[in-house]
Image (tube, coloured by chain):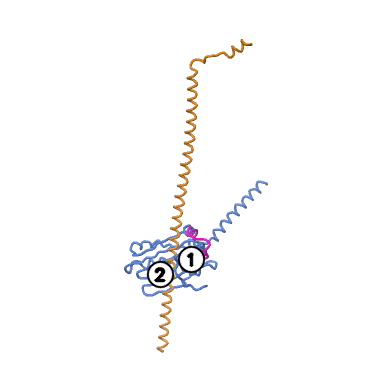
Chain colours: A blue, B orange
Amino acid sequence: MKTMTRRARSMTKYLGGLWLCAALVVSAPDAQAQALKLDHLSRLAAEATESVDLTLPPELIQLAAGAVAQGDPKQAAVKDLLAGLKGITVKSFKFDRDGVYTQEDVDAVYSQLSGWARIVDLKEIGEAVSIHLLQEAGQTSGLVVVVAEPRELTVVNIVGVIDLAKLGALAGQFGIPELPIPAP
Amino acid sequence: MEQQLRSALRRVEPSAGFSDRTLTRIAGAERARASRRRGRALVVALALAASVAVATGAGWLHTKRQAGVERARQDVERALRITSETLLEVQSKVQARLASVGQEHLSEGQGL
């Protein structure tokens, strides 16, 4: 009888542990879903006159956040902004001629954005710019900016809690230019 | 009594080889002391070498870590700068489009 009770307790603990793990997995923000697969764009670097290809994992961002000086309120705001970020990917290419990248390259980005809100969508002949946001639990947890011009292609993907107003408030700090974003 | 004292205090010659044995023993003791001194010096030298190696390694690791942190800071700064510049670019395009749409409406209004 005692053995049975001990087993039952052990099983309860085991199941409790499993339940807790499952709850954590379900409630954890799905950073993978917010991070786009943009590797197909990296090949453009070979044909670009200027290129920036940065993929920053959360560890690197937090390392950078640790290097931000303490005490200064503006620097604290930078730290605060970085604390919420789980990944930044920047693919930016400038070309000396038209038609280096294809519409399929851009469509491969758009195809990953189902469930994202397109807050800006501007299309002209040979040109498309758009901003997409992913909202989760009332917070912006993903940002994608696409600028596709005949001789330029830039895709930015930020994963994590992003406060655009905070980003705007950091003008002049940490290399961030003036960004006139209206307060929410 | 006097006889006994004289007998006890009489000069006795050391056995053969006594001085050699004594000198050998002194030399052995001297060698042992020198060996112990060398051993201690070796231990101190090894400890110093280990300390220097640890300090150098720690310094190298610190420098490497600092370089990594600085590189991370520069990468994040660059990424945020490009993000902001791209958002600015989008914003200016939207404003230009709004201005052009406004002009078109104005022209249409004047045409009527």
Give the answer, above or below, for where A59 lies relative to B100. above
What stretch of residues is rendered in magenta? A63-76
Q: Which of A74 and B97 is in front in this view?
A: A74
Do the residues under discs 1 and 2 have CB atoms within 8 angstroms?
no
User: Where residue A68 sits in the image (x, y, percent)?
Assistant: 49, 60
Badge 1 marks a residue whose secondary structure is strand
As shown in the figure, which amino acid type bears the numbered disc 1? Gly
Q: Which residue lies furthest to the front in this view?
A: B2
Which chain is indicated by disc 1?
A
**Mark 2 packing: few (<14 Cα in 10 Å), some, or many (20+)?**
many
Q: In which quarter of the image is residue A27?
A: bottom right
Q: Residue A166 carries which label?
A: none
Image quadrant of residue A21? bottom right
Horizontally, residue A46 falls left or right of residue B16, namely left
Q: How far apart are marks 1 and 2 (CA)?
A: 17 Å
In this figure, which residue is indicated by the disc labeled 1? Answer: A142
Quarter of the image for the C terminus of chain B: give it: bottom left
Identify which amino acid the numbered label 2 is placed on: Val
Position in image of residue A179 (x %, y %): 46, 71
Residue B74 lies within the magenta run: no
Give the residue at mark 2. Answer: A147
